[in-house]
Image (cartoon, grey):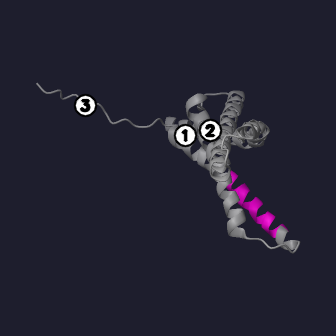
Amino acid sequence: MADTHQTPPQTPDATTQPVIVTALLVAAFLLAGLVLNAITSMLSTFAYGGGYSFISTVGQGLATQVFTLVLPVAVGVYAGFRVVAPITAGLRLKSVLARSLVASAIAAVLAFAVGFVLILATTVTDNIFGNSFPLGQFGGAIGRAFGSLGTTVSIFFGNVPLVALAAVLLWLWLGAKRRTASV
C-alpha cells in the first residue's frame, strides 16, 4: 500500500527575507562609502595637479575592498542576525544591541580570516615566482597577517554603529510584520 501522506514543502522562516535584506543594505552602505571615498580621493588628486588612472588604481582598490571588507561584513551580519544571535520581534532593545555587537564581531573575524588567507596566498605566489628560495619570507607574512589584528579591531569598532542601526531597523521591521499579521 502506497503512503499517501505528503509533507508540505519547506518554507523559509519569516525572518529569513528581512535578515537577507538587512545584510544586503549593510553591504550597500559600505560599498557606497567606498565609492565615495574613491571619488573624493580622485578629486583631491586632480585638485593638486596629479595624474590619476581611475580604472587601474581605484578600480583595483575598490574590487579588493569589496572582497576583503564588504563581503565578509555582509556575511558576518547575516550569520550573526540569522544563525548565531537571531533577532526576533520579541526581544528587548538592549538584547538587540548586544546581538548587533556579536554580529559586528563575527563580521570582523571573517574580514580578518579573508585578509589572513589573502596575505598567505600572495606570500606563497610572490615567493615561488619571485625568489629562488621560496620559504624565506614566511616569517614576514605571518607577522603581517597577525599585524592586521589592528585592522580587525578597527573594522569591528567602525562597523558597530552601522550594524547596531541595522539590528534596530530589522527589529522594528519584524515587530511591524508581527503587528500587521495579528490585525
Q: Is 41 part of what is drawn in magenta? A: yes
User: Mark 1 — residue?
Assistant: 177
Q: Are marks 1 and 2 in contact (CB under 8 Å)?
A: no
- Mark sitting earlier along the chain (1/2): 2
Please count the marks in the image. 3
Amino acid under label 3?
A: Gln
- Mark sitting earlier along the chain (3/2): 3
Q: How would you rate the neighbour count of disc 2 (Cα within 10 Å): few for under 14, some for 14-19, many for 20 or more? A: many
Q: Are marks 3 and 1 in contact (CB under 8 Å)?
A: no
Residue 69 seen in this snapshot: yes
Rendered view: 169 above or below 89: below
The residue sitting at 73% across, 55% down in the picture is: 33
Amino acid under label 2?
A: Gly
Q: Are marks 3 and 2 in contact (CB under 8 Å)?
A: no
- C-alpha span from label 3 to label 2: 36 Å
Q: What mark, if any, has residue 135 been given in the picture?
A: none
The residue sitting at 61% across, 47% down in the picture is: 71
Q: Kindly state the secondary structure of the residue where label 3 is placed.
A: loop
Q: Nearer the viewer, residue 49 or 167?
A: 49
Position in image of residue 67 (x %, y %) = 62, 50
- Mark sitting earlier along the chain (3/1): 3
